[in-house]
Image (cartoon, grey):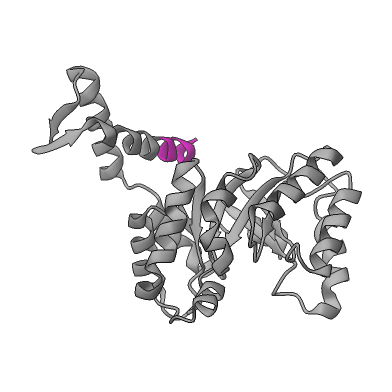
């Protein structure tokens, strides 16, 4: 499934070792997952990561020991059920001592992590993204797993990620037979500040890519704003009849960088 997933159109492919693997299969899954990285990976723009088990549990410790023992570690690790920044610092220190340059993706899905998310986001320069674990978070908060009850949690994670320039990825949409519901939720999280949304099936990917990829009109509008500020050399310009202030430039440059990466 791993090589097939690499051609699915996803930006990130995550190999699962945590909740999706039964306890009796953990050792076999770990060995097979790490074997995938024994050979050099193609430079195809797809980020490869492995979701290990919780660092406070025996399976997680076994995952870390196996990663430290190999000379070909995964390029990235996803850390579930994090509660404190100390967990991330601990793993960073071990990877540094071993000489691994493995990147980290941290799932914010516990109430403790939501409380400490600002410190967690700053706990390691290895962190590339924060992920929102909505299902576990709803259970922790004793709230309904729906947009309204989880809006505060999502907003807090976006705030923490933006403070240090991290990507922030939303929880996958679990109803595979409701593509329009997924589209609506993806648009809501995009507008809230999320960089992307997880997928649990290949048929979800095209919709998510469409939602999070700037269209031609958006790209052209960004270019007009950037050019207007370059020509005006001022803090305010009028583009398409709307007053635009200079802080908007940051978002316009972000849109163009995404467009350039896709076209490149």
Q: Quadrant of residue 225?
A: top left
Does the magenta run of residues contain 129?
A: no
Foreground residue among 172 and 135: 135
Q: Residue at x 27, y 36 (%)?
A: 248
Left/right of residue 136 with respect to residue 207 in the rendered view: right
Q: Residue at x 81, y 48 (%)?
A: 73
Q: Is residue 141 above or below residue 56?
A: below
Foreground residue among 148 and 229: 148
Left/right of residue 226 with respect to residue 34 in the rendered view: left
Q: Is residue 202 above or below residue 100?
A: below
Tell me residue 193's x, y (percent).
Answer: 38, 52
Does the magenta run of residues contain 258?
A: yes
Q: Quadrant of residue 103?
A: top right
Tell me residue 120's x, y (percent).
Answer: 59, 51
Q: Is residue 260 above or below residue 132?
A: above
Q: Residue at x 24, y 38 (%)?
A: 221
Foreground residue among 207 and 119: 119
Number of disc labels: 0
In the rendered image, the quadrant that contains the N terminus is: bottom right
State the predominant SS element of the stretch in magenta. Answer: helix
Residue 140 visible in the picture: yes
Question: What's the magenta region?
Answer: 257-264
Residue 10 visible in the picture: no
Furthest residue to the left? 241
Tell me residue 110's x, y (percent).
Answer: 58, 68
Tell me residue 220's x, y (percent).
Answer: 26, 37
């Amino acid at each position: 499934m791993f090589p097939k997933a690499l051609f699915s159109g996803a930006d990130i492919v995550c190999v699962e070792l945590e909740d999706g693997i039964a306890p009796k299969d953990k050792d076999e899954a770990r060995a097979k997952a790490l074997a995938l990285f024994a050979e050099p990976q193609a430079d195809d723009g797809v980020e490869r990561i492995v979701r290990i088990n919780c660092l406070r549990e025996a399976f997680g410790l076994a995952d870390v020991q196996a990663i430290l023992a190999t000379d070909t570690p995964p390029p990235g690790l996803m850390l579930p059920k994090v509660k404190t920044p100390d967990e991330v610092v601990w793993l960073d220190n071990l990877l540094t001592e071993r000489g691994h340059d493995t990147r980290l993706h941290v799932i914010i899905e516990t109430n403790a992590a939501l409380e400490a998310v600002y410190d967690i986001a700053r706990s390691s320069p290895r962190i590339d993204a924060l992920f929102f674990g909505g299902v576990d978070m709803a259970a922790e908060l004793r709230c309904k797993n729906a947009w309204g009850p989880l809006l505060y949690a999502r907003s807090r994670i976006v705030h923490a990620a933006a403070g240090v320039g991290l990507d922030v990825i939303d929880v996958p949409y679990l109803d595979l037979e409701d593509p329009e519901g997924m589209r609506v939720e993806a648009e809501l999280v995009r507008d809230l500040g999320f960089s992307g949304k997880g997928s649990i099936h290949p048929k979800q990917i095209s919709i998510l890519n469409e939602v999070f990829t700037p269209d031609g009109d958006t790209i052209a509008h960004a270019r007009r704003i950037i050019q207007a500020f370059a020509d005006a050399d001022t803090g305010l310009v009028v583009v398409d009849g709307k007053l635009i202030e200079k802080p908007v430039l940051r978002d316009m440059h972000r849109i163009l960088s995404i467009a350039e990466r896709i076209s490149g």
